[in-house]
Amino acid sequence: MRKKILIGIPPKNHIDLAMDEVDGLENLGYSCETITYTRNNQNLSVFNKLMGVLANAFDLVKHLNRFQPDILYLNSRFEPVGSTRDFITLLAIKFFVKRRPKIAIKSHGSNFDIFIKKSFFYKKMVLPFLIEQVDLWWFLSQDEKRTIALHHAKMGSKIFVTPNIINPRRSVSSPLFLEKYGIPKDKFTFLFVGRMVKEKGVFSIIKSIPLFEQRDECIFIFVGNGDDFEKIKLISKELNLDKYVCFLGFIPEEECDHFYANTDALVFPSHDEGFAMALFKSLACGMPILTTQIRAAKDYLKEPNNCLWVDGHSEQSVATALNRLYEDTELRKRMSENNVLLGRNFLKEKVTQQMQRDFLTVTEANKKF
């Protein structure tokens, strides 16, 4: 009999990633169903957020009692709000689900302030309950695993590290795409994709351009919006960078993926990331990369084989790397070839096979999923 997995997925962000996991697990012989599991609208009141979490939890309970899966797999985040949602959900499951499945959570981001919060609610209720109830916890980097083990040994024993699935075939090179977004064919194009906020290192990119010796041969494409979007554009004007930059704002993920196959190098000096999809999508498409040595990036990338490391707080560091990458054609070629090869580690088949192995490790000695 096929083992069954109920998978909690987001309603809109990274749907392709979630469905790639579903497809890969089904190809391995699992019977999968999905249910929406996500954060509430952040503009709602605390009361309405709580009502939303409760409604979602009891919808999940009904689904579990009907489907009776062997595994419940939830996509979430390890931080105060996300962990509170998980706590309420698993509490409902504990009391109202007839046949308890194994529970796996994948954390797409973490904030370890939850370990040092002094409130009774987090320290004595949320964390102990989650650690007791969750059988397998996936994080996206070894750095997160080590940090958790230092704070809580029991939780650390349940942590596994997994990458996200990356499908480079979703990025297609096309002259029509360049024309659609006004990207000149005769310029070397540096790409940034992400939220336009300080934490993503966008200020260091903008301020590095006047220090970049070859800027007249290049253009910088910024895809995304965020709290600092207007401020970034203002700085660009103050520095007279209009002819070097192109701000495209938010573009839906399915469309955005094509930028990786239609630009020349990624600049991603983020200050804090887990497994940055922009970074690994560009890698799988064979792009040369400038990025910061944090979390999943330092797990998989090496300098100069795959990238050049930069200090995301320093425009001089970014400018130095821009000059080096642009001037060294052979370096870019080697990086591109190496990154295509490295990107194969994140294909659907490899990632879901690893997930299956992790499922097996949390079962009883003679019981297999």
Image: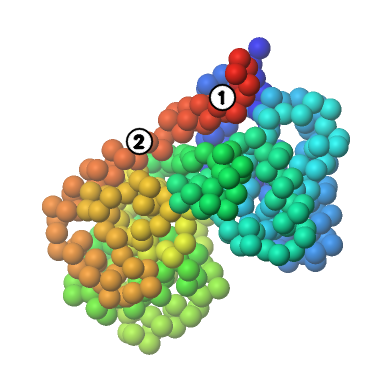
- Left of 259 or right of it: where is 27? right
Residue 257 appearing in the image: no
Which residue occupies the foreground of this view, 293 or 26? 293
164 or 367, which is in the foreground?
A: 367
Counting from the top left corner in percent of width and height, residue 219 is at: 29, 68
Figure check: 337 above or below 62? below
> Given this view, does label 1 or label 2 mark the residue nearer the observer?
1
| Residue 27 coordinates in the image, percent (x, y) | 52, 22
Whether residue 98 is situated above or below residue 38 in the rendered picture: above
What label does residue 344 carry, if any?
A: 2
Q: Residue at x 24, y 62 (%)?
A: 188
Label 2 secondary element: helix
In the shown orientation, is residue 17 left or right of residue 340? right
How far separated are the C-alphas under marks 1 and 2?
24 Å
- Does 244 appear above or below 282? below
Q: Is residue 5 above or below residue 177?
A: above
Residue 279 visible (yes or no): yes
Residue 128 position within the rendered picture, expressed as x and y whole percent measured from the top left = 72, 47
Q: Amino acid at mark 2?
A: Arg
Residue to which mark 1 is pinned? 360
Quarter where residue 329 is shown: bottom left
Residue drawn at 22 percent across, 43 percent down = 337
Quarter where residue 192 is shown = bottom left
Amino acid type for the residue under numbered disc 1: Leu
Residue 286: image tag:
none
Question: At 61% from the left edge and 36% from the top edge, which residue is drawn?
Answer: 136
Q: Give the residue at the far top of this rendering.
A: 1
